[in-house]
Image (tube, helix red, strand yellow):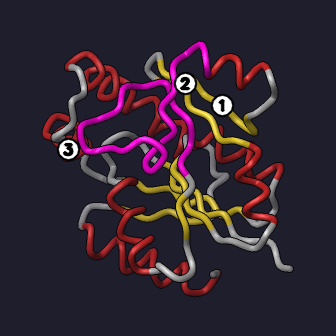
Amino acid sequence: MNSGKLIILVGVSGVGKTTIMKNLIEIFKDKLNFYPTYTTREKRNNEKNEIDYFFINKDEFQKLKDENFFIETINYNNNFYGTSYKFLENLNNGFNYIVILDLNGALEWKKKYKNTKIILIDCKNEFEIKNRINNRNYNEKKEEKINRINNLKNEKKFNISNKNYDKKFFNNNLNNCLNKIETYLKLIL
């Protein structure tokens, strides 16, 4: 059996990764699956446990980490995120997946799984990204939004300077961005 492809979307907060991912899953519904990662952050009002993420507390996360349950983990805005090794089994069984990770997590996957493609989502307009973060209809605390905005410049600089992504797309217009990513994925899925 062929190994599945892993498509990883990376980019700063507010660049549209989740919106793009949900659209791509709809476009490629017979070819592309989503596997939720684990997080300790609070569930947003539009999210469902075990569908969007596996929501667990920090003690549970640390216990799983100590048991070597995760292939990669990150601490972002005082919340932990991680992807389980179980996910690797699904890929090895030939299923294609799309996930959202930070670039460090994506690079860990690329080292451990050769069929990984990293797609960097960027936006030329920083003001637009800040507006997206501030206007989200999430139950995110104001402090979390401020932290995300404050992290923008460093994250963006790291993502762009670290040329380890396979493709880069600008999400200045969602439909244009989706069309370009769709064309790219048709070549590799």
Question: Relative to 87, does residue 78 appear above or below in the rendering?
Answer: above
Query: Can you say which quadrant of the picture contains the N terminus?
Result: bottom right
Q: Is residue 44 left or right of residue 131?
A: right
What is the quadrant of residue 96 in the picture? bottom right
Could you tell me if the residues under marks 3 and 2 are in contact, i.e. CB atoms within 8 Å?
A: no
What is the crowding at mark 1: few (fewer than 14 residues within 10 Å), some, or many (at least 20)?
many
Q: Residue, x 61% and y 58% (percent of image)?
A: 118
What is the quadrant of residue 90 in the picture? bottom right
The CA span between labels 3 and 1 is 26 Å
Residue 126 lies, in percent from the top left, at: 26, 42
Question: Relative to 56, does residue 91 appear above or below in the rendering?
Answer: below
Q: Which residue is labeled 2 in the image?
A: 80
Q: Earlier in the sequence, mark 1 or mark 2?
A: 1
Query: Can you say which quadrant of the picture contains the C terminus?
Result: bottom right
- Magenta stretch containing residue 52, yes or no? yes
Q: Which residue is labeled 1 in the image?
A: 73
Provide the secondary structure element on which disc 3 rests.
Answer: helix
Q: Residue, x 30% and y 53% (percent of image)?
A: 124
- Magenta stretch containing residue 81, yes or no? no
Q: Which residue is labeled 3 in the image?
A: 132
What is the quadrant of residue 48 in the picture? top left
Q: Residue, x 47% and y 16% (percent of image)?
A: 78
The CA span between labels 1 and 2 is 7 Å
Q: Which three-letter amino acid code belongs to the residue tagged 2?
A: Phe
Could you tell me if the residues under marks 1 and 2 are in contact, i.e. CB atoms within 8 Å?
A: yes
Provide the secondary structure element on which disc 2 rests.
Answer: strand
The CA span between labels 3 and 2 is 23 Å
Q: Earlier in the sequence, mark 3 or mark 1?
A: 1
- Most common SS among magenta residues: loop
Q: Which three-letter amino acid code belongs to the residue tagged 1?
A: Thr
What is the crowding at mark 3: few (fewer than 14 residues within 10 Å), some, or many (at least 20)?
some
Q: Residue, x 33% and y 44% (percent of image)?
A: 47
